[in-house]
Image: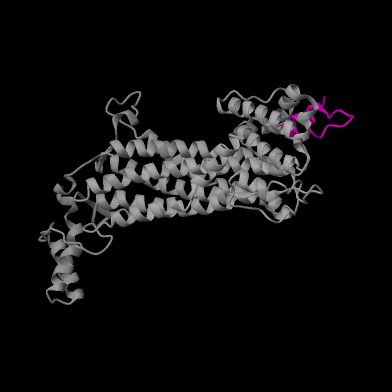
């Protein structure tokens, strides 16, 4: 039998085959169990429109569940000479069920098959990313509340500027993740639309029930226009890439802060010793390698949407093999970001804070604005107060008052962490993950 779904009565040059297949077989291992889920929904629909017998559906579903379990255990392989995950699944079915296994491809193309695989994979990974973002958010907010009273210097232009606090610093990154999650939610909603039934981008003469597969797979809606469904290849990955890059940007910035604040020149925080490494010649060194790698990995992730854009840019309507290369950029990105999120949550949980930073008089000038404001509140014109305090600092006679009274919303005395928590809760509820999980569970129970 043919090993390729498109094979005819001639053999392709082996070097051409090697070049065109590329890394696709390795990348398709990410998609194996989702290819099975898509096939289960598709053949259930085929039976409903009379293209499969009830008995055939039962046998096919049972075999597909077995293949799904193999993929879940990480034991699914694409054999030598087999082109992709779709060919491998169909081969496994025909080995067990004969020609019946060949019937699963009626009414679809590898184009909409890979589209639905990618969407099912992506929404599952977005759920995992959202969970890890939520865990990091919880650690940051807990630390913000724990150290809400501990002051630290705030900087502009890397110059000592005004008083800040660890409550503000940790809380700032927590709120940043709330905005990042809005991007993630938008990416999830754009992803969670069903392309199955668009075939090669122009539909099918079979009377397919696309709403049925949409419901079976737990999609919110379908990609209605079949041409647009195919145009979404690359666009989905780019949009999701921007969402992942937004989270990565927050992590990279936080990692830079942590590396800076951990250095001896600052000594604001102490990283867990198990998250540092030593030097081969300097016995005193405790290098913040984990955060440095997070910074580099997250900076690399921020390039991913541009890579996808450059691969897909200027392609006209229809499928082109260029799109295959996007998998190599896109699919591994989730594991890299998930690793970074997990590492950040672990380190933040164990990070220790220096409660005595401001004992050093070098930080006294950062209280100058507080003194200017105190004089202005007492009736002195602001510009006169500004000049007086500036002259006192130059003369060495400025004595700071470190008793601060910041009360407005979002200031160090009123962090609004309860509102930030409510914001995150609201965003998380907007995903409606339960619908997806319920649909997949019910599909596997057929």
Magenta stretch in the rendered image: 1-21
Most common SS among magenta residues: loop
Which residue sits at x=22%, y=47%?
147
Q: Nearer the viewer, residue 67 or 399?
A: 67
**Which residue is located at x 46 percent, y 40 percent?**
296
Q: Relative to 329, does residue 67 appear above or below in the rendering? A: above
What is the x, y in percent for residue 20?
Answer: 75, 34
Residue 345 found in image quarter = top left
Tell me where residue 101 sits by quadrant: top right
Tally of numbered discs: 0
Horizontal side of residue 70 vs 180, given as left or right: right
Visible residue check, residue 233: no
392 vs 185, nearest the viewer: 185
Taking depth in this image into account, of 5 and 80 the one nearest to the observer is 5
Q: Does the stretch in magenta take in 324? A: no
Quadrant for residue 76, please give it. Answer: top right
Q: Quadrant of the N terminus?
A: top right
Question: Percent x, y for residue 308?
Answer: 62, 47
Above or below, comparing residue 108 to residue 77 in the picture:
below
Q: Residue 249: percent from the left, percent from the top?
A: 45, 48
Magenta stretch: includes residue 20:
yes
Report the residue that reaches farthest toward the right.
9
Task: Note whether residue 130 is visible.
Answer: yes
Quadrant where the C terminus sits is top right
Front-most of 108 and 280? 108
Percent position (x, y) of residue 443? 60, 38
* 110 relative to 182 in the view: left or right: right
The image's colouring method is one colour
Residue drawn at the location 50% of the way across and 52% of the way down: 185
């Amino acid at each position: 039998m043919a090993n390729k779904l498109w094979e005819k009565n001639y053999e392709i040059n082996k070097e051409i085959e090697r070049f065109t297949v590329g890394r696709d077989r390795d990348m398709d291992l990410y998609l194996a169990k989702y290819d099975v889920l898509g096939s289960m929904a598709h053949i259930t629909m085929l039976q409903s429109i009379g293209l499969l017998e009830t008995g055939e559906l039962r046998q096919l579903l049972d075999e597909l569940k077995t293949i799904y379990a193999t993929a879940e255990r990480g034991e699914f392989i694409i054999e030598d000479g087999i082109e992709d995950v779709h060919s491998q699944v169909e081969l496994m079915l025909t080995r067990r069920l004969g020609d019946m296994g060949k019937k699963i491809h009626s009414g679809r193309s590898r184009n909409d098959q890979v589209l639905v695989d990618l969407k099912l994979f992506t929404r599952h990974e977005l759920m995992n990313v959202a969970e890890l973002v939520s865990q990091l958010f919880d650690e940051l907010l807990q630390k913000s509340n724990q150290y809400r009273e501990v002051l630290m210097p705030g900087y502009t232009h890397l110059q000592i500027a005004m008083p800040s606090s660890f409550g503000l610093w940790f809380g700032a990154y927590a709120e940043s993740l709330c905005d990042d999650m809005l991007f993630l939610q938008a990416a999830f909603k754009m992803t969670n639309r069903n392309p199955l039934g668009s075939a090669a981008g122009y539909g099918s003469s079979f009377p397919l029930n696309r709403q049925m597969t949409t419901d079976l797979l737990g999609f919110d809606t379908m990609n209605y226009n079949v041409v647009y469904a195919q145009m979404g290849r690359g666009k989905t990955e780019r949009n999701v890439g921007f969402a992942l890059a937004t989270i990565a940007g927050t992590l990279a910035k936080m990692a830079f802060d942590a590396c800076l604040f951990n250095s001896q020149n600052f000594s604001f925080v102490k990283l867990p010793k198990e998250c540092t490494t030593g030097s081969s010649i300097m016995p005193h060194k405790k290098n913040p390698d984990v955060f440095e790698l997070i910074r580099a990995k997250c900076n690399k992730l921020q390039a991913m949407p541009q890579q996808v854009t450059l691969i897909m840019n200027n392609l006209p309507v229809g499928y082109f093999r260029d799109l295959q290369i996007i998998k190599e950029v896109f699919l591994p990105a989730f594991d890299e970001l998930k690793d970074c999120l997990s590492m950040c949550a672990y380190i933040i949980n164990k990070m220790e804070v220096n409660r005595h930073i401001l004992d050093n008089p070098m930080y006294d000038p950062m209280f100058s604005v507080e003194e200017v404001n105190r004089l202005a509140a007492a009736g002195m014109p602001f510009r006169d107060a500004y000049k007086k305090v500036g002259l006192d600092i130059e003369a060495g006679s400025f004595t700071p008052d470190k008793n601060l009274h910041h009360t407005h919303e979002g200031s160090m005395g009123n962090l609004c962490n309860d509102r930030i928590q409510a914001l995150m809760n609201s965003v998380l509820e907007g995903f409606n993950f339960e619908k997806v999980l319920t649909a997949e569970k019910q599909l596997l129970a057929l």
